[in-house]
Amino acid sequence: MGARSPASKPALVRLTEADLPCVAALEEASGWPMGGSEAQLAATLADPATAVYGLMVGDGQAGGDELAAYAAVARLPFEAELQAILVDEARRGQGLARKLLAVVADQARDWGSERLLLEVRAGNAPAIALYRAAGFTDDGVRRGYYPPRPASLPGPETTPPRQAGAAGAAREDARLMSLALSAG
Protein backbone atom coordinates (compact mmCIF):
# COMPACT_ATOMS: atom_id res chain seq x y z
CA MET A 1 0.00 0.00 0.00
CA GLY A 2 1.36 3.38 -0.93
CA ALA A 3 1.85 6.53 1.12
CA ARG A 4 -1.34 8.25 2.16
CA SER A 5 -2.31 11.65 3.43
CA PRO A 6 -3.30 11.37 7.09
CA ALA A 7 -5.70 14.28 6.52
CA SER A 8 -8.05 12.25 4.30
CA LYS A 9 -11.05 11.16 6.38
CA PRO A 10 -12.05 7.53 5.87
CA ALA A 11 -15.58 6.85 4.58
CA LEU A 12 -17.56 3.90 5.96
CA VAL A 13 -18.90 1.48 3.32
CA ARG A 14 -20.54 -1.94 3.36
CA LEU A 15 -18.22 -4.19 1.37
CA THR A 16 -19.47 -6.69 -1.22
CA GLU A 17 -18.02 -9.36 -3.48
CA ALA A 18 -16.93 -6.57 -5.83
CA ASP A 19 -14.54 -5.38 -3.10
CA LEU A 20 -12.70 -8.71 -2.92
CA PRO A 21 -9.54 -7.40 -4.64
CA CYS A 22 -9.06 -4.53 -2.18
CA VAL A 23 -9.80 -6.72 0.87
CA ALA A 24 -7.39 -9.40 -0.39
CA ALA A 25 -4.72 -6.74 -1.04
CA LEU A 26 -5.06 -5.36 2.50
CA GLU A 27 -4.83 -8.84 3.97
CA GLU A 28 -1.80 -9.73 1.85
CA ALA A 29 -0.01 -6.50 2.80
CA SER A 30 -0.69 -7.29 6.45
CA GLY A 31 0.39 -10.91 6.33
CA TRP A 32 -3.17 -12.24 6.45
CA PRO A 33 -5.01 -14.51 6.01
CA MET A 34 -3.58 -16.92 8.53
CA GLY A 35 -4.78 -20.19 7.00
CA GLY A 36 -7.60 -18.68 4.96
CA SER A 37 -7.96 -18.35 1.23
CA GLU A 38 -9.32 -15.91 -1.32
CA ALA A 39 -12.26 -18.29 -1.90
CA GLN A 40 -13.12 -18.18 1.82
CA LEU A 41 -12.89 -14.40 1.77
CA ALA A 42 -15.20 -14.25 -1.27
CA ALA A 43 -17.67 -16.52 0.53
CA THR A 44 -17.60 -14.22 3.57
CA LEU A 45 -18.33 -11.17 1.41
CA ALA A 46 -21.23 -13.02 -0.28
CA ASP A 47 -22.74 -14.51 2.89
CA PRO A 48 -26.07 -12.84 3.77
CA ALA A 49 -25.48 -13.71 7.46
CA THR A 50 -22.22 -11.74 7.50
CA ALA A 51 -21.73 -7.99 7.33
CA VAL A 52 -18.36 -6.67 6.17
CA TYR A 53 -17.62 -2.98 6.63
CA GLY A 54 -14.70 -1.02 5.30
CA LEU A 55 -13.16 2.38 5.77
CA MET A 56 -12.11 3.81 2.42
CA VAL A 57 -9.69 6.68 1.91
CA GLY A 58 -9.26 8.48 -1.35
CA ASP A 59 -7.28 11.06 -3.19
CA GLY A 60 -10.41 12.81 -4.49
CA GLN A 61 -10.05 11.31 -7.95
CA ALA A 62 -12.27 8.67 -9.52
CA GLY A 63 -10.99 5.19 -8.74
CA GLY A 64 -8.54 6.56 -6.18
CA ASP A 65 -10.22 5.07 -3.12
CA GLU A 66 -8.23 2.56 -1.11
CA LEU A 67 -9.30 0.29 1.73
CA ALA A 68 -7.71 1.44 5.01
CA ALA A 69 -9.47 -1.02 7.32
CA TYR A 70 -12.25 -3.58 7.43
CA ALA A 71 -14.23 -5.66 9.90
CA ALA A 72 -16.47 -8.69 9.42
CA VAL A 73 -19.25 -9.75 11.78
CA ALA A 74 -21.35 -12.92 11.48
CA ARG A 75 -24.91 -13.32 12.66
CA LEU A 76 -25.47 -16.37 14.87
CA PRO A 77 -28.80 -17.60 16.28
CA PHE A 78 -28.62 -15.51 19.50
CA GLU A 79 -25.26 -13.80 19.23
CA ALA A 80 -22.93 -12.23 16.71
CA GLU A 81 -19.22 -12.93 16.24
CA LEU A 82 -16.52 -10.51 15.19
CA GLN A 83 -14.66 -12.64 12.67
CA ALA A 84 -12.01 -10.18 11.58
CA ILE A 85 -10.84 -6.64 12.07
CA LEU A 86 -7.81 -5.33 10.23
CA VAL A 87 -6.30 -1.87 9.85
CA ASP A 88 -3.59 -1.02 7.33
CA GLU A 89 -0.32 -0.77 9.26
CA ALA A 90 0.30 2.81 8.03
CA ARG A 91 -3.06 3.92 9.49
CA ARG A 92 -2.92 2.27 12.90
CA GLY A 93 -3.33 4.52 15.90
CA GLN A 94 -5.92 6.75 14.18
CA GLY A 95 -9.03 5.25 15.82
CA LEU A 96 -10.12 3.25 12.75
CA ALA A 97 -10.45 -0.06 14.62
CA ARG A 98 -12.48 1.67 17.33
CA LYS A 99 -14.81 3.13 14.69
CA LEU A 100 -15.26 -0.25 12.98
CA LEU A 101 -15.84 -2.00 16.30
CA ALA A 102 -18.66 0.45 17.09
CA VAL A 103 -20.23 -0.17 13.66
CA VAL A 104 -20.00 -3.94 14.17
CA ALA A 105 -21.64 -3.67 17.62
CA ASP A 106 -24.43 -1.55 16.12
CA GLN A 107 -24.95 -4.17 13.40
CA ALA A 108 -25.18 -6.92 16.02
CA ARG A 109 -27.74 -4.87 17.96
CA ASP A 110 -29.75 -4.34 14.77
CA TRP A 111 -29.83 -8.12 14.33
CA GLY A 112 -31.15 -8.48 17.89
CA SER A 113 -28.03 -10.29 19.10
CA GLU A 114 -27.62 -10.68 22.84
CA ARG A 115 -23.80 -10.63 22.80
CA LEU A 116 -20.93 -9.85 20.46
CA LEU A 117 -18.25 -12.53 20.68
CA LEU A 118 -14.62 -12.52 19.57
CA GLU A 119 -11.33 -14.29 20.01
CA VAL A 120 -7.92 -12.67 19.92
CA ARG A 121 -4.33 -13.81 20.28
CA ALA A 122 -3.56 -13.69 23.99
CA GLY A 123 -0.41 -11.68 23.33
CA ASN A 124 -2.05 -9.01 21.14
CA ALA A 125 -2.06 -6.31 23.83
CA PRO A 126 -3.20 -3.43 21.56
CA ALA A 127 -6.28 -5.37 20.39
CA ILE A 128 -7.13 -6.54 23.90
CA ALA A 129 -6.88 -2.94 25.16
CA LEU A 130 -9.23 -1.83 22.35
CA TYR A 131 -11.78 -4.50 23.20
CA ARG A 132 -11.65 -3.80 26.94
CA ALA A 133 -12.07 -0.06 26.31
CA ALA A 134 -15.19 -0.92 24.27
CA GLY A 135 -16.65 -2.87 27.21
CA PHE A 136 -15.69 -6.45 26.28
CA THR A 137 -15.04 -8.86 29.15
CA ASP A 138 -12.99 -12.05 29.30
CA ASP A 139 -14.91 -15.31 28.85
CA GLY A 140 -12.07 -17.83 28.75
CA VAL A 141 -8.95 -19.07 27.02
CA ARG A 142 -8.32 -21.65 24.30
CA ARG A 143 -4.90 -23.03 25.14
CA GLY A 144 -2.46 -23.40 22.26
CA TYR A 145 -5.07 -22.34 19.70
CA TYR A 146 -3.03 -20.22 17.27
CA PRO A 147 0.03 -21.38 15.34
CA PRO A 148 3.15 -19.29 15.88
CA ARG A 149 3.08 -15.94 14.09
CA PRO A 150 6.14 -15.67 11.82
CA ALA A 151 8.41 -12.83 12.98
CA SER A 152 8.69 -11.65 9.36
CA LEU A 153 4.99 -10.70 9.17
CA PRO A 154 3.94 -7.10 9.78
CA GLY A 155 1.50 -6.44 12.56
CA PRO A 156 1.44 -6.17 16.31
CA GLU A 157 4.02 -8.08 18.28
CA THR A 158 2.59 -10.74 20.52
CA THR A 159 3.95 -12.22 23.70
CA PRO A 160 5.70 -15.57 23.51
CA PRO A 161 3.28 -18.44 22.92
CA ARG A 162 2.35 -20.51 25.96
CA GLN A 163 1.75 -23.98 24.56
CA ALA A 164 3.78 -26.42 22.50
CA GLY A 165 2.39 -28.24 19.49
CA ALA A 166 2.98 -31.84 18.47
CA ALA A 167 6.22 -31.08 16.65
CA GLY A 168 7.45 -28.84 19.46
CA ALA A 169 6.42 -25.67 17.64
CA ALA A 170 5.16 -23.11 20.13
CA ARG A 171 1.49 -22.16 19.83
CA GLU A 172 -0.29 -19.15 21.28
CA ASP A 173 -3.43 -19.05 23.40
CA ALA A 174 -6.63 -17.43 22.19
CA ARG A 175 -8.48 -15.12 24.57
CA LEU A 176 -12.28 -15.34 24.30
CA MET A 177 -14.15 -12.10 24.97
CA SER A 178 -17.72 -10.85 24.70
CA LEU A 179 -19.76 -7.67 24.88
CA ALA A 180 -23.30 -7.76 26.28
CA LEU A 181 -25.65 -5.90 23.93
CA SER A 182 -28.68 -4.12 25.28
CA ALA A 183 -31.95 -4.98 23.57
CA GLY A 184 -33.12 -1.68 22.18
Image: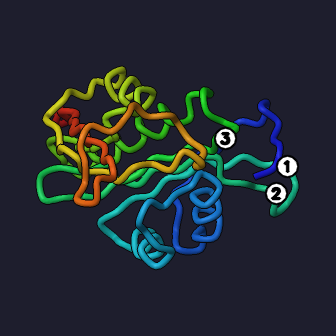
Q: Are marks 1 and 2 in contact (CB under 8 Å)?
A: yes
Identify the residue at image location x=31%, y=23%.
132
Q: Which residue is mark 3?
A: 10
Q: CA distance from mark 3 to mark 2?
A: 13 Å
Q: Would you call the spot at circle 3 few (<14 residues within 10 Å), some (14-19), or many (20 or more)?
A: some
Residue farthest to the right, as pictured? 61
Along the line of sight, the residue nearer the viewer: 63 or 146: 146
Circle 1: residue type: Gly
Identify the residue at image location x=28%, y=47%.
108
95, above or below 18, in the image: above
62, above or below 90, in the image: below
Q: Position of residue 167 (x, y in %)?
A: 28, 60
Mark 3 and mark 2 lie on one chain; the one further toward the N terminus is 3
Q: Are marks 3 and 2 in contact (CB under 8 Å)?
A: no
In the picture, the disc for residue 64 is 2
Circle 2: residue type: Gly
Name the quarter where the C terminus is drawn: top left
Identify the residue at image location x=47%, y=31%.
98
Q: Would you call the spot at circle 2 few (<14 residues within 10 Å), some (14-19), or many (20 or more)?
A: few
Q: Position of residue 141 (x, y in %)?
A: 17, 38
| Count of numbered labels shown in the rendering | 3
Along the line of sight, the residue nearer the viewer: 101 or 26: 26
Image quadrant where residue 27 sits: bottom right
Q: CA distance from mark 1 to mark 2?
A: 7 Å
Tell me the element at label 2.
Answer: loop
Q: Which residue is mark 1?
A: 60
Q: Nearer the viewer, mark 1 or mark 2?
A: 2
Q: CA distance from mark 1 to mark 3?
A: 12 Å
Q: Is residue 109 visible?
A: no
Q: Are marks 1 and 3 in contact (CB under 8 Å)?
A: no
Mark 1 and mark 3 lie on one chain; the one further toward the N terminus is 3
Q: Is residue 184 visible?
A: yes
